[in-house]
Image: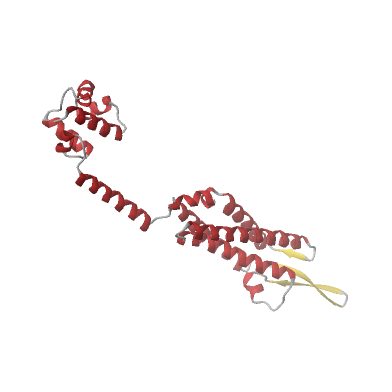
């Protein structure tokens, strides 16, 4: 029996647990001087203490006496580590991306609720005049109406572009969860960034058109624009949506 080797082994096991000699002594039920003597090779624990140490360090008594972990035990630990890593990679993984998935899904529900409900209404003044009186025509103008409307104008074009880019942003964010490589993720992230810029541009243009006195925009349309603005900012700035944060899934 090599006491020095055994003492060094006990020291390594204790440090792996990030414990002081005093901490270990309290756990095992001995004095710290006894622990110090074991680790210096000046003494060896009795059999009852060896059993406690073996159980605490998850090693065998024979390994403590020999001062090293057996090859079989090392292999077993490696298998355990590989199994855990495999489960992390193939189970409910990608924790950095799951936030974006649920965030995008929640936003999709809110966006469609605001965009397709009748209260997203706009009134505009017709150019026709009957008996010298200008008639105000109220039109329920939500996404459903203008997507399938035969009336095409500049505002409808920007609204359609806004609608498609918003859906694209949501889709890209949800698809981050399915990306298996950094390259695929970076490409999709760049595409989403471009869509956000276009989306913000259409939002600005729609806001300019809303200022036009010929439009009387309902509260529903204002809510849509506010929702788009807030969500785009969150997609760009919120930590769980940032590229540097999400890339941690691939490291």
**Residue 68, picture quadrant:** top left
* Identity of the residue drawn at 74% across and 64% down: 216
* Identity of the residue drawn at 48% across and 56% down: 182
Horizontal side of 136 relative to 164 (left or right) equals right
Q: How many marks?
A: 0
* Identity of the residue drawn at 79% across and 62% down: 212
Relative to 208, residue 28 above or below: above
Horizontal side of 147 relative to 78 (left or right) equals right
On the image, the x and y values in percent for residue 98 come to 46, 55
On the image, the x and y values in percent for residue 222 come to 67, 59
In-front residue for pair 106/42: 42
Relative to 69, residue 170 above or below: below
In-front residue for pair 226/82: 82
On the image, the x and y values in percent for residue 207 come to 72, 59
**Residue 130, picture quadrant:** bottom right
Q: Quadrant of the N terminus?
A: top left
Can residue 62 be seen in the rendering of this structure?
yes
Name of the residue lying farthest toward the right: 132
In-front residue for pair 55/121: 55
Can residue 109 be seen in the rendering of this structure?
no
Horizontal side of 124 relative to 237 (left or right) equals right
């Amino acid at each position: 029996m090599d006491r020095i080797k055994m003492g060094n082994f006990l020291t390594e096991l204790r440090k792996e647990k990030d414990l002081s000699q005093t901490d270990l002594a309290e756990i095992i039920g001995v004095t710290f001087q006894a622990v110090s003597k074991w680790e210096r090779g000046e003494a060896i624990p009795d059999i009852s203490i060896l059993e406690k140490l073996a159980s605490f360090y998850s090693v065998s008594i024979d390994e403590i006496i020999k001062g090293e972990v057996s090859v079989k035990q090392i292999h077993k630990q490696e298998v355990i580590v590989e199994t855990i890593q495999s489960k992390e990679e193939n189970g409910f993984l990608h924790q950095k991306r799951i936030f974006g998935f649920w965030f995008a899904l929640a936003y999709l529900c809110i966006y469609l609720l605001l965009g397709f409900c009748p209260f997203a209404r706009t009134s505009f003044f017709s150019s026709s005049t009957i008996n010298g009186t200008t008639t105000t025509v109220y039109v329920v103008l939500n996404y459903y109406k203008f997507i399938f409307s035969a009336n095409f104008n500049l505002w409808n074009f920007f609204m359609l572009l806004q609608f498609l880019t918003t859906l694209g942003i949501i889709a890209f964010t949800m698809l981050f969860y399915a990306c298996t490589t950094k390259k695929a993720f970076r490409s999709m992230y760049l595409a989403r960034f471009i869509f956000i810029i276009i989306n913000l541009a259409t939002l600005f243009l729609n806001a300019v058109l809303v200022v036009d006195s010929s439009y009387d925009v309902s509260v529903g349309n204002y809510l849509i624009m506010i929702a788009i603005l807030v969500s785009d900012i969150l997609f760009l700035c919120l930590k769980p949506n940032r590229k540097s944060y999400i890339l941690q899934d691939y490291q």
